[in-house]
Image (cartoon, helix red, strand yellow):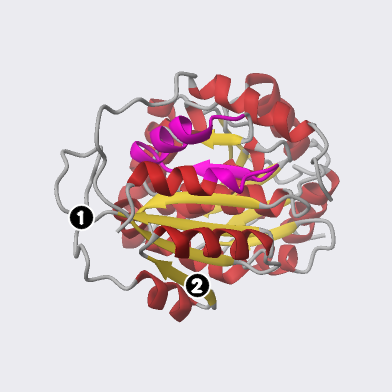
Amino acid sequence: MIERDQAYGTIAEYLTDQLIVTGIGSQAASLFKAKDRPENLYLRGPMGLAPAVGLGVALAHPERKVIAIEGDGSLLMALSSLAAVAHNRPKNFVLICMDNGTYEAGGKGTTINAGGTDFVKTVQGLGITLAESVEDLEALKQATKRLLDSQECAFLHVRIGARKGPFSPPKLRPYEMKQQFLSALRKAPSRP
Amino acid sequence: MSYVEDLVVAIETAGVKVATSVPDNWLAPVIKKLTDSKSVTHAPAAREEDALGISCGAALSGVRTLCLMQSAGALNTGGTLATLGIAYGVPLVMIITDRGLLGDATIAHFEKARAFRPFLEALGIPFYDLAPDFLNKDQIEQAFLMAESGQKPIALLITKETLGES
């Protein structure tokens, strides 16, 4: 089990010019805390659509690596979006599921079928073959580096603990986030 | 040309880079042609919320995108339109088949036809019927110009008149 802040901090260490779309609530707040940057598009809604929105960014910009980060409860809410990811399988897309078995922003109740869903088998069954699960920090480091460097659509499941401390979402309004994200996109990537 | 060929020409001419869809009978031939397009990346989805999410992602990253669906599916997308399309000011065009109007009445379509346009009005989404000669009227390009100037989703509705069947 990895602490939430450690998981986001580890992923942040490997970020260069990747474009990131986060799910609502804890995912947005955690990335905002770990590494706020113009290339982050924080969703305020709807719940569960970070994979779809990230897929759209990836299809629009095949020259850029795109990451979508979603929680387990949100991913279960929009499992059909995984079929869209699997159908299109853009080589520049990585989907990360942060799984703590809890609706962090929804009253802290247990997510449906918590601990009983094998997300890796689920996405592999849909056709995303490059998929793995990690439960410790060293494995997360290796997997993050490997999947961000891969030239294949990939899925990473990260088993994390419950959030500790207060919840601090990004300060920008959605319209301002859009403008910031577009400005970052207009800049040339820092690497080929 | 048929409305199918006209629509694909209009979409390609407008410079659409990413199109998403969930099919119905009227849209299926359009989607088939879009899949073969050399200039449009077509991304099918299993549900309309997903299709709209993909389109929003593409639009939020600065490319022209549209989303094809039926009115029944559009009715599923209220939360996505409100919290993403409208809240973020996403300039995308939705092409929606408005089923169940006069001349297209079946038990399956009746109730959604009554709910659909009030649903768009409640969300404040501008919507316009696609004319049978929409290609000559440049309605697809005009819809994008409106979406981009207003930074808001726009809906173009396909009816039996659009198909030239009434």
Does the magenta portion include B52? no
In x, y percent, where is residue A37? 60, 30
Tell me the element at label 1.
loop
Give whichever of A186, B136 is nearer the camera. Answer: A186
Asked whether residue B45 appears in the rendered view, the answer is yes
- Is residue A25 on the magenta stretch? yes
Tell me the magenta residue range: A12-37
Q: Which residue is mark 1?
A: A111
Residue to which mark 2 is pinned: A131
Q: Mark 2 and mark 1 in contact (Cβ < 8 Å)?
A: no
The image position of residue B160, as x and y in percent, is 57, 52
Q: Are marks 1 and 2 on the same chain?
A: yes
Q: Nearer the viewer, residue B141 or A175?
A: A175
**In the rendered structure, which amino acid carries the disc numbered 2?**
Ala
1 or 2: tag closer to the N-terminus: 1
Q: Secondary structure at mark 2?
A: strand
Q: Position of residue A95 (x, y in %)?
A: 51, 58
